[in-house]
Amino acid sequence: YQRRVRENIKQKQKINMNEFEIAANWIKSSTFLLIIAGAGMSADSGLKVYKEIADIEIYKKLNLKYYDLCQPDMLEADPELFFGFWGNCFNQYRTIKPHKGFKN
């Protein structure tokens, strides 16, 4: 399974420079840009950190790590797995009480 996913990713990694220009124009014309980075404050809020978030039996059986689940091409390779993983993350983000560092 993991080999099939990685093969799909490798085939799609040939990027046309025009795609970068398109992405740059999207960013320039956006009203806002959300960047999510780091795990320190998230962990302090009670969210799982990267090494823990994919520590679920089904991912272990498929020999998938957090890195594998975060590959953009995972959506095409296995939509059910992709949405299951990110849906679970989203639900955790929605229900956790934010760390005091997130407050104004």
Image (spheres, rainbow, N blue to C red):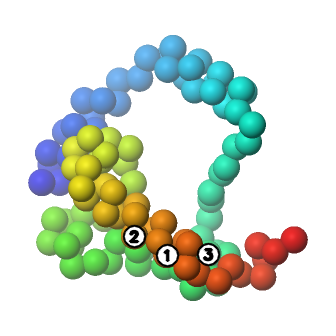
Q: Secondary structure at mark 3?
A: helix
| Residue 48 drawn above or below residue 66 | below
Q: Position of residue 81 (x, y in %)?
A: 25, 58
Residue name at image x 22 percent, y 37 percent: 8
* In front: label 3 or label 2: 2
Residue designated by label 1: 92
In the image shown, does 78 or 38 lie closer to the viewer? 78
The answer to whether the residue labelled 1 contacts the one labelled 2, judged by CB atoms less than 8 Å apart, is: yes
Task: Kindly identify the amino acid type of the residue bearing the numbered disc 1.
Answer: Gln
Where, by quadrant of the figure, is residue 89 drawn? bottom left
Q: Is residue 99 above or below residue 12?
A: below
Q: Which residue type carries mark 3?
A: Ser
Name the quarter where the C terminus is drawn.
Answer: bottom right
Q: Give the mark nearest the N terminus, 1 or 3.
A: 3
Q: CA distance from mark 3 to mark 2?
A: 15 Å
C-alpha distance separating marks 1 and 2 = 6 Å
Query: What's the residue at 56%, 20% (across, down)?
Result: 22
- Confirm whether residue 42 shows in the render: yes
Q: Quadrant of residue 94?
A: bottom right
Q: Residues within 10 Å of mark 3 (few under 14, many from 20)?
A: some
Q: What mark, if any, has residue 88 been given in the picture?
A: 2
From where the camera sits, is residue 50 visible?
no
The residue singled out by tag 3 in the image is: 42
User: Which amino acid, by three-letter code, is at mark 2?
Assistant: Asn
